Amino acid sequence: MNEYIDFLTTEQRNPASSRIDQLSTEQILRLINDEDSRIAEKVRASIPQITAAADLIIEAFRRGGRLFYFGAGTSGRLGILDASECPPTYGTDKDMVQGIIAGGAQAIQEAVEGAEDDTELGASDVDGRGVTPLDVVVGLAASGRTPYVLGAMKRARDIGASVIGISNNDGTPMGPFAHVMIETVVGPEVILGSTRMKAGTAQKLILNMLTTTSMIRTGKVYDNLMVDLNPSNEKLILRSKRIIRMATAASDEEIEAAFKSSDNQVKTAIVMIKTGSGADEARRFLSKGDGFVKQAINLWEEEQKAEG
């Protein structure tokens, strides 16, 4: 095991930070920022693999499947963060995107001894979540060798789910269990082995890309506006009405009326205003248009033309 760790890029010493303990505060910050500035370029190089992964997720969502993230430590927390942001941002059901961390809820704030080394725990957590062949499972591990994650990926693949691996090293043990493997190698950390830094940032960028792209491709965005958000508090209610205004250029009175009549559904309100239809009719066109606002409006226009 030690010999394997010796070859991991994430476990190498970074020569750029070899005297970091002797630098001033500003010098340390500039050094960290210099290292961070290279991450986006490395992620860009992985876009072909990220594309393949996103397409698996999009197809799963279209057929009623779900997305699961399995990770330990920082990787597990990042998966939970990404999953927890989907319901308020895109109005998804809480079960549609799920983040699972080795050791359970306790591990979100503190280390749970031995959890990440338990292959069987990863497999049993997959079973516990009821993963099916309709679903996508993403294994997250900077090293690419975390036993918990490998156990989850293997079990998911045996079940018939689509499996994606995300790591920050090349040629890791995750590869044989993944239908799509994303290996974004960002180089040694400023502090040896502190993969919450560059590796964690790369993973966060990739997860953002996966879910954002999937939500766009499944009709939860109109132009560049989030139109399926859940207006669950005052800030989100105000944002919802502002989005309707930007999408329609309607008056405050029109927006208030449509928002109320649509049961606070931004998509429905936009289609109502853009087409002059009622809430039920707007929902009918949205259903026919697979939930895409633009498609719903086009269908309404086609129907108007057909009626003369």
Image (cartoon, rainbow, N blue to C red):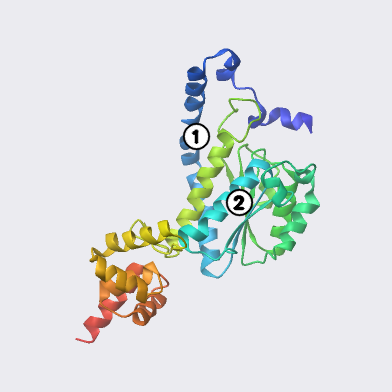
- The amino acid on which the numbered mark 1 sits, given as a three-letter code, is Ile
Between 272 and 152, the one nearer to me in the picture: 272
**Label 2 neighbour load within 10 Å: few <14, some 14-19, many 20+:** many
For disc 1, the marked residue is: 39
For disc 2, the marked residue is: 80
Tell whether 129 sits left or right of 220. Answer: right
Q: Nearer the viewer, mark 2 or mark 1?
A: 2
Label 2 sits on a secondary structure element that is helix
Q: Which residue is drawn at 44% across and 63% down?
A: 231
Q: Which residue lies furthest to the left in this view?
A: 308
Q: In this view, does 240 lie above or below 9?
A: below
Label 2 or label 1, whichever comes before in sequence order: 1
Q: In this view, does 54 lie above or below 114?
A: below
Residue 253 position by quadrant:
bottom left
Residue 146 position by quadrant:
top right
Residue 195 position by quadrant:
top right
Which quadrant holds the N terminus? top right
Label 1 sits on a secondary structure element that is helix
Which disc number belongs to residue 9?
none
Q: In this view, does 3 lie above or below 79?
A: above
Q: Which residue is drawn at 49% across and 59% down?
A: 88
Rendering coords of residue 32 (x, y %): 52, 25
Rendering coords of residue 170 (x, y %): 62, 37
Asked whether the viewer can see residue 247, the reply is yes
Q: Which residue is drawn at 36% across and 73% down?
A: 260
Q: Which residue lies furthest to the front in this view?
A: 234
Rendering coords of residue 120 (x, y %): 80, 53
Which quadrant holds the C terminus? bottom left
